[in-house]
Amino acid sequence: MCDFLLGHQRSALHDIATLPLRPPCERLSGHKSSVCSRSYFVVVMVFFHVYIINVIALLFYVHYSSGQEDASRSRDAPGSNHQRPESRRPPSKAEFLRDVSLTRVEGIRVGHVQRLSLVPGKVHEMRTLSLKPLLFEIPEFLSDDECRVVMQLAQLKGLMESQLMVQEGQEELAKELNLSPEEIFNLLDINQDGQLQLHEVYVCLSVDCELYSSSLLGLYSSVFPGLLSLEEFRVLSSDAFQRFLVQRGVKRSQLVRNSRHTWLYQGKGAHQVLQDIKERVTRLTRLPSTLVDLSEPLQVVRYEEGGHYHAHHDSGPVYPETACTHTRMAANTSTPFETSCRYITVLFYLNSVEGGGETAFPVADNRTYDEVVRNSVRNCDKSNLRVKPTKGTAVFWYNYLSDGRGWVGEQDEYALHGGCVVTHGTKWVANKWINIDPDYQRQARFQQLVSQHSDTHQDL
Ligand SMILES: O=C(O)CCC(=O)C(=O)O
Ligand SMILES: [Fe+2]
């Protein structure tokens, strides 16, 4: 089209340039000169106007097409909110890591202290507690006021039992699932050997994690430490089994967890204290704020006297068949296995506990991993490392190793931890988990999807 327009212009110019410049109405004696006629003047003027219109049209065209190019360039820019699903290809790992790189805080050595600037006018000290897992302690991370506000907000919202002895509505849930115990067994039996290894059962079942809750598995694994057969699994999954346990005098202390908890949203519009804590966590962990923003809300936990949490991992191993809860909606796969993919745990102590309630890391920095004792009530003092709950202190650790290329790697088995029994008073803690999918493509798709959703909200 440009060539076409330019062609016209060139010929029009040529015509004008070659015209003899004479007065239009001059008449030469003897004959009427055509170059002097009125009609010749009209033709010249028409050509001249067509030329001007062509130039203006060309200018409009150039201006309009470069505007469109700019818009589409900015739509495709990394981090832009204007992404069209059909025009997006998944980024390569290198491309993705350029935008969302994971910095890992260095531990240097146990006892090493780093000074941090997290809030204006205050310097925090961060001490390395262990290298396996990579674990840090930051005293006075929260102010007394912040601790109070978080506890009050949690009370206002209401706390629920973290683990029920007999789960209400479980039978209805089981019916809704519409899967027979045999079918569930087959789905869980990853290596299809007709037996369930404990790790296969520990992978939380997405359809209803609580149905085969870790409490029962904890109890059960002490009875059947090796393998579970289909027959044993049938019993395990029945509601009656739980009632049977209660009738047999199974106590709350034997549950994996004995506490109450609630969740507090930390996004826009949340209480300022909650937003401040989220921002401080972003600075502490040195992770891109998108990752922290897209993570679980703050979990606030209250233990009464006698409360505890047996040794556990906050997040499970990620096998090829395992989905992460937070990226599940963006993953194009259907898998029955799910874990929460909590790359980092930041644990805050909201009060100082009068007696007990330490956070125990039974195998921290220890090579004798085989001698794991999961019962935090009985074996707390045998743990390698115990952190005393002190108001305002935060501890944080990595539940996964690095893959060596700037992304999340395998689960760190040393990140096993638990809450020792509270012997006097109550204990309040809060967990900020940062969720990252070890499969970077799923994380990238999830972020794309979320940015498209927020786009829709902005447009409305
Ligand atoms: O209460 C503690 O010290 C540990 C809590 C914990 O591990 C959890 O809530 O996941
Ligand atoms: Fe935990």
Image (spheres, rainbow, N blue to C red):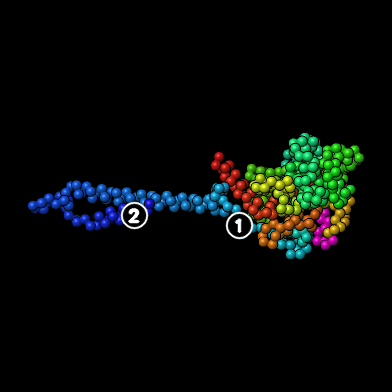
As drawn, the residue found furthest toward the bottom would be: 108
Residue pushed farthest front? 193
Which residue is painted at 82% across and 58% down in the image? 363
Residue identified by numbered label 1:
92
Report if residue 95 is visible in the image. yes
Badge 1 crowding class, 10 Å Cα cut-off, few under 14, some 14 to 19, many 20 or more, is few
Q: Earlier in the sequence, mark 1 or mark 2?
A: 2
* Residue 383 placement: quadrant: bottom right
Magenta extent: 358-368
Q: Nearer the viewer, residue 354 or 445?
A: 445
> Which amino acid type corresponds to the residue marked 2 in the rendered image?
Leu
Q: Report x, y in % for residue 227.
A: 85, 50
| Residue 165, above or below 143 | above
The secondary structure making up most of the magenta span is: loop
Q: Is residue 425 visible?
A: no
Which residue is the site of mark 2?
A: 6
Looking at the figure, which quarter contains the C terminus? top right
Q: CA distance from mark 1 to mark 2?
A: 43 Å
Place of residue 78 in the rendered image (x, y in percent of width and height, measured from the top left): 57, 54
For residue 437, side relative to residue 242 (left or right): left
